[in-house]
Amino acid sequence: MDHAWAIVLAGGSGTRFWPLSRRARPKQFLPLAGSSSLLARTLERMAPLIPPERVIVVTSAALLGASRAELPAVPAENFLGEPSARNTAAAVGWAAATVHRRDPDARLVVLAADQHITDPDGYLAVCGRALEACDAGTLVTVGITPTRPETGYGWLELGAERGRGVFEVARFVEKPDRARAEAFLAGGRHLWNGGQFFFRADAILDAIRQHLPVLGAALASDAQLADRWNALPSISIDHGVMERAAGVLTVPGAFGWSDVGSWTSAWELGDHDEFGNVSEGSDAVLVDCRGTYVHGRPGKTIAVIGLDDLVIVDTEDALLVMPRDRAQDVRAITAELERRGLGSRL
Amino acid sequence: MDHAWAIVLAGGSGTRFWPLSRRARPKQFLPLAGSSSLLARTLERMAPLIPPERVIVVTSAALLGASRAELPAVPAENFLGEPSARNTAAAVGWAAATVHRRDPDARLVVLAADQHITDPDGYLAVCGRALEACDAGTLVTVGITPTRPETGYGWLELGAERGRGVFEVARFVEKPDRARAEAFLAGGRHLWNGGQFFFRADAILDAIRQHLPVLGAALASDAQLADRWNALPSISIDHGVMERAAGVLTVPGAFGWSDVGSWTSAWELGDHDEFGNVSEGSDAVLVDCRGTYVHGRPGKTIAVIGLDDLVIVDTEDALLVMPRDRAQDVRAITAELERRGLGSRL
């Protein structure tokens, strides 16, 4: 699409996919629920709308080399390496300013580098609609049709319809408690705020200057931004701009979105055998197992007997075994490794 | 002890310790429930009675090199490599004939290479008594005080006492059913036949000539034995000689004997932490686990969360995960690997 640019937020770190994820190879680099990395698939999915020359990848300075290597079709100068993590408002601002200098008429698609979408055609249809909706200078967010009473996400409430499949956002809602989340799911007027935004570069830069003036001022030039980066307020584009701006629109969509939040998600999204087992990366031999997830690597045989609902992840120098419903406890392991001085395994 | 020789039967193969055991590295080479191999510990245990120069190791031709490497103190010519497996009567006969030519007055201790003993002093006391008891030409077997109604072993019934701690064997009993085994355990007159034998070399050679004349004739010279080896009957020294011979004596003993029959035994024999977990060979990180056995290797972190009574064995090219009580099902895995053409992992 003319003047459409993708801003890929690829600075994530995190330990929920240990031991496959490491400091130098966080989640977006992993081939979860697919054979290529989540990062590479993020670009492939957008390719019908946006060619690699119009993709900007914002990542940490430490991951710049790995990110370029993972996306060889994207020009090297399109990678922005943050000197420190300053949350998504700063990342989006930097990318928007960079694109705006090259293409004053640019429209931006902001998206995370580590998500999974099972219906890419449905997704592209939503993106196309959202790109049109933002053309007049409005900020647009995708609202994801909820499939469960999720308390870990922000939600948004649908307002009046403003066009075919385009609605006003009546209000954004912080992570709700279980009862509210269930009411939202039942009511049908609330959607997940999936953190995918569409706006013209000039529109988001105006909104940043209005709502985050310190960041807005720093964006005047790359030299100023570099000078002031480490002192920028650390705030998300959601909280800092989207929730404060007037007239935000949303395009609802159901396209099998997942933020691939843990090993449990990897099992959910994988190819299940007749017993509900998922085996990735290795020639696993599962005897009398149900609902078990195995992530291995070529040349290593993983054999499991008589175990249900387990997660088994094997790498060269670390192995993790746990029940699937303990996936949130991976942090207990990484904390213990730090304590034992085994941080080199992180 | 003068003229005392050890005959170590080290030809075992088997898959129960897969993936740590391999065809080229069966159980006797593994550091189970200890830091050196079962084979090396078998010799260390006997060392106060028998020096390495008087140890004969009978193994398969394929394992000759590995066996010599594992026992560098034993002279190379003391290793006998069987061209094919012909069970223990042939192995003991070959070793007895070999020793008898070097030392006509030799007394032999026949023992398996893959057992574990927790009380080596108690064991040596029993061995000393048994070596004395066999000096008059009698065949002597060690009777192990039973600790459970084991249906997998042969048992023997105690006869009259013939000296301090030395008894006649009233009869040998084939593997009993559960009810008989429980009666044996309760009655106190039955012992496990642990397959450790003591006899003079000339006495066992006489007994072989009497009860196994084909083998007896073949033992006349090494050249004849080599010629006839593959045609020898495959029979154990227990069935072929001990159970047929008259006047067999037994020395009962309780010295924490185990045949280390499966991964379950390895857990039983290991060093348990306060939660009953056993971790060998690696720096395992166990969070909220009980009764779990981990066998790893240096330089690899094994992390387990919230799992009880599991066996986890990790090697370079294969990993096994199973409940502790499924240890007998390892064969299902090795059979499946054969079926899939992954025999290189065996």
Image (cartoon, coloured by chain):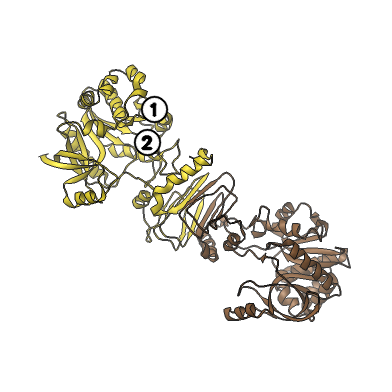
Chain colours: A brown, B yellow
Where's the C terminus of chain A, which quadrant?
Answer: bottom right
**Which amino acid, mark 1?**
Ser
Can you say whether A161 is above or below B219 in the image? below
Left or right? Give the position of A140 relative to B231: right
Pair 1/2: label in front: 1
Left or right? Give the position of B74 relative to B167: right
Question: Residue B145, how many percent across, how many down?
Answer: 21, 47
Q: Dot 2 corresponds to which residue?
A: B12
Of residues A168 and B3, the one drawn nearer to the viewer in this rendering? A168
Of residues B108 and A46, the one drawn nearer to the viewer in this rendering? A46
Question: Residue B252, how many percent across, how many down?
Answer: 19, 43
Q: Dot 1 corresponds to which residue?
A: B84
Q: Quadrant of residue B163?
A: top left
Q: CA distance from mark 1 to mark 2?
A: 12 Å
Going from N to C along the chain, the mark reached first, 1 or 2, is 2
**Which amino acid, mark 2?**
Gly
Q: How many marks?
A: 2
Crowding near the residue tagged with mark 2, few <14, some 14–19, many ≥20 C-alpha atoms within 10 Å: some
